[in-house]
Amino acid sequence: MLTIVFVTLMYGAAMPILIVYGFGGIFCLYIVERHMLYYGYQTPPMYDEKLNNLALDIIQKAPLLCLPFSFWFFGNL
């Protein structure tokens, strides 16, 4: 999911359709993960607070990578 968010934010200014594809990818991941949680896994995965905090720390860096790529793209128009 982090990869989808990073790629969508980095190249979304150049290819706006990528935002729709990114939403579709995250939605599919949500549906598959929900299905696997109910029907696929024998025991639920052990997610803890440390994993959540790590993902939040990583996702906060995504807009910082979006800015240079957007500036570069809009500067070359």
Image (cartoon, rainbow, N blue to C red):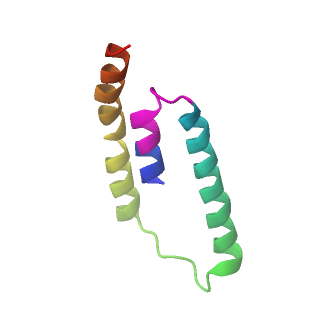
Residue at the (38%, 54%) spot, across then down? 55
Judging depth in this view, the residue of 48 and 66 nearest the camera is 66
Q: In which quarter of the image is residue 40?
A: bottom right
Judging depth in this view, the residue of 28 and 58 nearest the camera is 28
Q: Quadrant of the C terminus?
A: top left
How many marks on residues? Answer: 0
Coordinates of residue 41 in the picture (x, y in percent): 61, 81
Image vertical order of residue 1 relative to residue 49, above or below: above
Find the residue positioned furthest to the front.
77
| Residue 14 lies in the magenta stretch | yes
Coordinates of residue 53 in the picture (x, y in percent): 36, 55
Residue at the (47%, 75%) spot, across then down? 46
Image vertical order of residue 71 relative to residue 46, above or below: above
Image vertical order of residue 60 relative to residue 49, above or below: above
Coordinates of residue 42 in the picture (x, y in percent): 62, 86
| Residue 23 lies in the magenta stretch | no
Residue at the (47%, 39%) spot, across then down? 8
Q: What stretch is highlighted in magenta?
A: 7-16
Judging depth in this view, the residue of 26 and 60 nearest the camera is 26
Image vertical order of residue 65 relative to residue 73, above or below: below
Coordinates of residue 51 in the picture (x, y in percent): 38, 63
Q: Quadrant of residue 63?
A: top left
**Position of 20 compared to 5: left or right?**
right
Residue at the (64%, 46%) spot, across then down? 24
Find the residue positioned furthest to the bottom.
42
